[in-house]
Amino acid sequence: DWTPASYIETTVRELREKLGGDKVVLGLSGGVDSSVAAVLLHKAIGKNLTCIFVDMGLLRKDEFSSVLDSYKHMGLNVIGVDAGDKFLGDLKGVTDPEQKRKIIGRDFIEVFDSEAQKLKDVKWLAQGTIYPDVIESVSVNGPSVTIKSHHNVGGLPEKMNLKIVEPLRLLFKDEVRRIGRELGLSELLLGRHPFPGPGLGIRILGEVTKEKVRILQEADAIFIQALRDSGWYDKVWQAGVMLLPVQSVGVMGDERTYESCVALRAVTSTDGMTADWVHLPYELLAKVSNDIINKVRGINRVVYDISSKPPATIEWE
Ligand code: XMP
């Protein structure tokens, strides 16, 4: 019978046999999969695992420091790299979504690689790939149609000449969560919504700038906190805010304003392949809209996205 405990026991034994005394490097994203993979590997090989967590400057508000702290509390050996300036510099003037993804993916590999080079004698690259990733990379990003190129760390292994170890490769998300729970990861971490690899970079439509990142982080933090406070966070699969490349006229006091618009997005889904928009209560939407417009300088209009996937996608880019 499959239980989280038996999976952990078997996998830890197999990892020890496979890896022996070799050194392993793993890229942490703050998400459930890479975190569970890290804790599982840490249990198997202890200090021979080094994790690298890259701040692309495109994470949610305060996410880098809070997630880095929680990893350190778990006893993981984590190197945090603040690379925001590089990413934002390379994204300057770029507006095409696929081009943005390519730049972010390429920069990520460069930063990760240069950190990993500093470690001596690393033989393996560990990844938190789960079963749906294996399927999706075949069906969605096959040679004939690329709807959106999902970057995780594709391309990295060849470049670094490392062998790959993927301890979650045969698991579905709910199994990964159960294993994480058994390993003692916090519910806060295990219950986190999926978040795209390119981060807020694909939620800022058009060119990404530091100022736009700041505006979006503020608005997103208000929306996510309101979902948590109202008990909706755990009922939705994924939620976030999109900063639109649209300015519109508003009025504040007796001044005319001409500022940006954000779209709120909240969806239910089982695997991200299809999704429905969530019927959030009007009162909740009203509160979030008021808070965002009153507190976030630069935004004077909030809309709610009522499109399902297909034909829309979850992210706007
Ligand atoms: P879409 O927008 O294609 O998103 O409906 C489906 C799921 O995938 C996430 N997503 C990404 N994840 N790299 C990722 O690692 C990406 O480039 C990327 N684009 C979308 C999205 O957040 C949703 O969970």
Image (tube, rainbow, N blue to C red):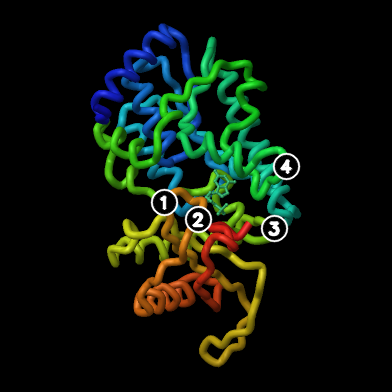
- Return the x and y of residue 233 as percentages of the image width and height: 34, 59
Kind of residue at badge 4: Ser
**1 or 3: tag closer to the N-terminus:** 3
Q: How many C-alpha atoms fall within 10 Å of the one at disc 1: few (<14), some, or many (≥20)?
A: few
The residue tagged with tag 4: helix, strand or loop? loop
Q: Report the residue at 53% width, 20% height from top.
A: 164
Q: Nearer the viewer, mark 1 or mark 3?
A: 1
Q: Report the residue at 53% width, 12% height from top.
A: 123
> Residue at label 4?
144
Quarter of the image with the C terminus is bottom right
The residue tagged with tag 2: helix, strand or loop? loop
**4 or 2: tag closer to the N-terminus:** 4
Q: How many C-alpha atoms fall within 10 Å of the one at disc 4: few (<14), some, or many (≥20)?
A: few
**2 or 3: tag closer to the N-terminus:** 3
Q: CA distance from mark 4 to mark 2?
A: 20 Å
Which corner quadrant of the image does residue 209 belong to? bottom right
**1 or 4: tag closer to the N-terminus:** 4
Q: Is residue 47 above or below residue 171?
A: above
Q: Is residue 54 left or right of residue 105?
A: left
Query: Which residue, as the protein is rendered here, is positioned at the far right?
Result: 93
Kind of residue at badge 3: Glu
- Return the x and y of residue 68 as percentages of the image width and height: 40, 38
> Residue at label 2?
274
Q: How many C-alpha atoms fall within 10 Å of the one at disc 3: few (<14), some, or many (≥20)?
A: some
Q: Are marks 3 and 4 in contact (CB under 8 Å)?
A: no
- Return the x and y of residue 80 as percentages of the image width and height: 48, 33
Q: CA distance from mark 1 to mark 3?
A: 31 Å
- Return the x and y of residue 128 as percentages of the image width and height: 46, 31
> Residue at label 3?
207
Q: Is residue 66 left or right of residue 231?
A: right
Q: CA distance from mark 1 to mark 4?
A: 25 Å
